[in-house]
Image: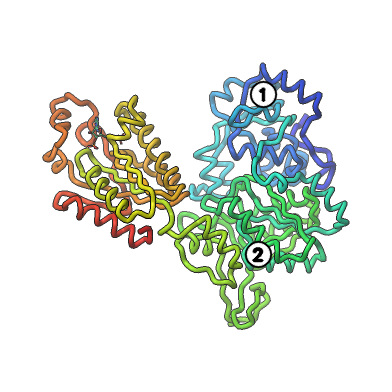
Amino acid sequence: MKTALLVEPHGGNPVNLLVDEDRSALLKEISLSLPDISLNDRQLCDLELLATGAFSPLDGFMVRSDYESVLDRMRLQSDILWPLPICLDISDTQARNIEGGQSVAIRDPEGFLLAVMHVEDIWPVDREKEALRVYNTLDRSHPGVDYLFRKSGDFYMGGRLEVLSLPLHFDFKQLRMSPEEIKNIYGKLGWQRVVGFQTRNPIHRPQFEMTIRAMRQAKANLLLLPVVGMTKPGDFDHYTRLRCYREVIKDYPPDSFILNLLSLAMRMAGPRDAVLHAIISKNYGCTHFIIGHDHASPGMDGNGKPFYASDEACLLTKDLSSEIGIRILPFEEMVYLPFEDEYRSFDEIPAETQTVSLSASDIRERIRTGRRIPEWATSPDVVRELQRAYPPPKKQGFTVFLTGLSGAGKSTIAKVLYSRFLEIGNRPVTLLDGDIVRRNLSSELSFSKEHRDINVRRIGFVASEITKNRGIAICAPIAPYESTRAEIRKIIEECGGFIEAHVATPIEECEKRDRKGMYAKARAGLIKGFTGVNDPYEIPESPEVRIDTTDLTPDEAAQEILLFLGQKGFI
Ligand code: PPS
């Protein structure tokens, strides 16, 4: 028996995996003796959409035959169209301890019981095959490929689900309705035709124009489905987007739309993602679905070429629309005509008409760098919300991460910077010097690679919290490993500035200074694994600033960093 299928294709009986109270009580009892699987953010999103029927006709995480069929022909074993694997990935150890035929307790990261899964099969993930079939690339700059290779477990586990509780959300509860609840509202309101619009961006003017046109074209109402699960790294957070949507919806005709959040973990698979979005909208009772150009696009690959052609998503969904049971409303790029003061679709305007446009990523970039956004691009209310959440660099937090050998001058430069930032006095400043951290945060750690990495990650975590709250963190550990530094950069850049300063004073000079006498001890064999002597230091490839302090005073060295910060608008 296949577990991932329903009898009817898209538009058949709605799937609802939530069990009733009696069954729930029984499952709770049984779960005590079952192995636990704790879900991560992406898996929680998948579970929620499976449970509510947004992923109908799936009624569990995919079994192997469906997974392979989806990869090979974009269909489940039963021939029903399905574009992307919805699989539960697990680790090697978990795979060794669970067998097909067994049930497992599915929990959230805090241990709260969400579901019981009746496991049918477990199989190893063929990452290359999946990446090529689903994303059409092995390029790691694709967020879906990156997830598959870096975060996903080595095995998939498929099987039917009985859900006791949806993943808990504490925000915007009134905006998180299931497909069934939304369809009931249409019934009450007498809505016969509904256009679905799924988005991971704030609604700027072009998107607004597109939705209005779509509503007119289809003589329909609008279901706005902002994606609040996982979107593309670097997107505006969903709290900010929601505040923007609340501004934008004031401009729609009254009672013509419903705003509902979608806990979807986007894979950014371009055309295949678009097909999934159309299916989800169908499951939410939409009769029409908007596909703009570059739908669900992950942007450019490592060679600066787009991963997918801008019309690929549109062509594929149009081809499959009757099978999905939804009308696709394709939209070319909406461009602004400054002389006419109006938006038009790019394919409607005569050649040589003067047009301007700002994409959602252009707007993101402008907001992040504190540049102005013209009123024709997005409404001033939206700009105000975005600026409030994403202030320009001079109001953002940032981390100065000094890395280099012992004795290179990191701590001294850090102290000069600390004083300068306090003198400027517009942000709280925290100094996380290597020695201070070792005494207070990492006193139990040694200098093994593993422990150095833990130490540096701790520093990165604290610095990211400070940066997020718009303070300044000055860190000065040796931090000898490139991959750990890159990890920290990624976390911190999500919430503010990250300035890596390589204090590149050569070892000969550091050893000559030897203020703590440690090089002498290391050379005498009294300290094992001393960085630069008998332990590695991986030189940063492209730090924001590189300073050799051999012939510089501490003030001169600090000045290099201050000048860089000034140039980037942080101070
Ligand atoms: S790391 O690699 O980032 O975790 O190192 P860090 O926390 O910055 O600690 C470096 C300071 O500890 C002293 N020390 C050693 N350094 C390198 N290797 C070994 N084995 C070692 N043992 C002790 C050294 O004085 C470093 O201080 P700084 O301020 O860098 O000179």
Is residue 82 toward the left or the right of residue 132 in the image?
A: right
Q: Classify residue 466 by image quadrant.
A: top left
Q: Residue at x 55, y 59 (%)?
A: 386
Query: Camera-side residue: 124 or 106?
Result: 106
On screen, 218 above or below 135? below
The image position of residue 541, as x and y in percent, is 31, 49
The mark total stands at 2
Amino acid type shown at disc 1 = Val
User: How does the figure colour the protein chain or chains?
Assistant: rainbow
Q: Which residue is mark 2?
A: 207
Q: Which residue is mark 1?
A: 104
Is residue 430 toward the left or the right of residue 360 in the image?
A: left
Mark before the other along the chain sequence, 1 or 2: 1
Q: Residue at x 78, y 29 (%)?
A: 1
Query: Camera-side residue: 543 or 203?
Result: 203
- Mark yes or no: residue 161 visible: no
The Cα–Cα distance between marks 1 and 2, rounded to whole angstroms, is: 43 Å
